Structures are given as C-alpha cells and as structure tokens.
Image (tube, rainbow, N blue to C red):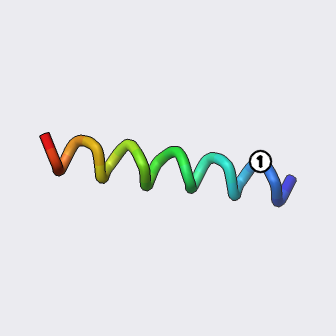
Amino acid sequence: MCVCVCVCVYVCVWFSLTLSLM
C-alpha cells in the first residue's frame, strides 16, 4: 500500500515538473 502511494506521488510530482518546464 505504502509503496503504491509513494510511486503515485513520485509520478505525479515528476509529471507536474515536466509540465511546468514545458
């Protein structure tokens, strides 16, 4: 459960950073 949440948060943060850089 914790691993899934950590992965989801990591992906969301990476996606947000990628969009803000574009």
Residue 16 place in picture, x, y as percent? 32, 49
Residue 1 place in picture, x, y as percent? 86, 53
Residue depicted at x 77% and y 47%: 4
Determine the secondary structure under disc 1: helix
Side of 13 relative to 2 (left or right): left
Q: How many marks?
A: 1
Side of 15 relative to 3 (left or right): left
Residue depicted at x 52% and y 45%: 11
Mark 1 closeness class: few <14, some 14–19, many ≥20 residues within 10 Å: few
Residue 21 place in picture, x, y as percent? 16, 48
Q: Nearer the viewer, residue 1 or 20?
A: 20
Residue depicted at x 71% and y 54%: 5
Residue depicted at x 57% and y 55%: 9
Q: Residue furthest left?
A: 22
Q: Nearer the viewer, residue 3 or 18?
A: 18
Residue type for callout 1: Cys
In the picture, the quarter occupied by the C terminus is: top left
Q: Which residue does the numbered mark 1 point to in the structure image?
A: 4
Side of 10 relative to 19 (left or right): right
Q: Residue furthest right?
A: 1
